Image (tube, rainbow, N blue to C red):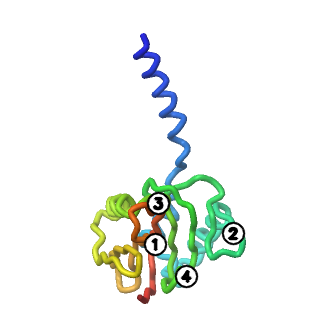
Amino acid sequence: MKIASLTGLMAVLACAAAPVLGADDTAIERVATCKDSWLDWKKSDPERLAALGDHIRTGFSQHENDAFLVPKSSLSIAGLRVTQLYPDSVGMGVGLSVSVAAAFDETRRKLEAVLGKPLGQCETSDGMRTCALKISDMRTVMVMAEDNPKAATTLVGCYYYYEK
């Protein structure tokens, strides 16, 4: 009798916890993983670029004077919770990137599953871990995180111009 009660309680808790993460935002995921290109849309499909801009404006808000936006509700890419969105550039890269609440190795694994290809060009330097996958001459998917086993956030993005 107690086992049935515990099983029922576990099922209720599992159902209640599932919506906490939020749904994958496929529009943001596709741009952050270079599957879609806002740079290409800028020249060939301005309506699609405008739709992405509207999507970002309605789903994210400016965080004070910071360069990033924060989601207005819980959402994810590749099953990883998005904490920040950089819609234009970060550091020396121009593109779109998101910060996710996950360690580097987990993010890399899930991103490789979404891409269907392994990330390569991995290196550790200046306190950072990075891996990249060149999609085309103008598009590179990158994963970056602090080189610290306790680091709990990772940056994922599609960059069109990137300088080290």
Q: Earlier in the sequence, mark 1 or mark 3?
A: 3
Q: Secondary structure at mark 4?
A: helix
Callouts 4 and 1 close, C-beta under 8 Å: no
Residue 105 sits above or below residue 143 on the image = above
The three-letter code of the residue at mark 4 reads Lys
**C-alpha gap between disc 2 and disc 3:** 22 Å
**C-alpha gap between disc 4 and disc 1:** 18 Å
Callouts 2 and 3 close, C-beta under 8 Å: no
Q: Secondary structure at mark 2?
A: strand
Q: Secondary structure at mark 3?
A: loop
23 displayed left or right of 136: right
- Image coordinates of residue 25 in percent, x first then y, are 52, 58
**C-alpha gap between disc 1 and disc 2:** 19 Å
Residue 32 sits above or below residue 23 on the image = below
The residue pinned by badge 2 equals: 62
Callouts 4 and 3 close, C-beta under 8 Å: no
Residue 152 - label: 3
- Image coordinates of residue 137 in percent, x first then y, are 36, 86
How many C-alpha atoms fall within 10 Å of the one at disc 1: few (<14), some, or many (≥20)? many
Q: Earlier in the sequence, mark 4 or mark 1?
A: 4
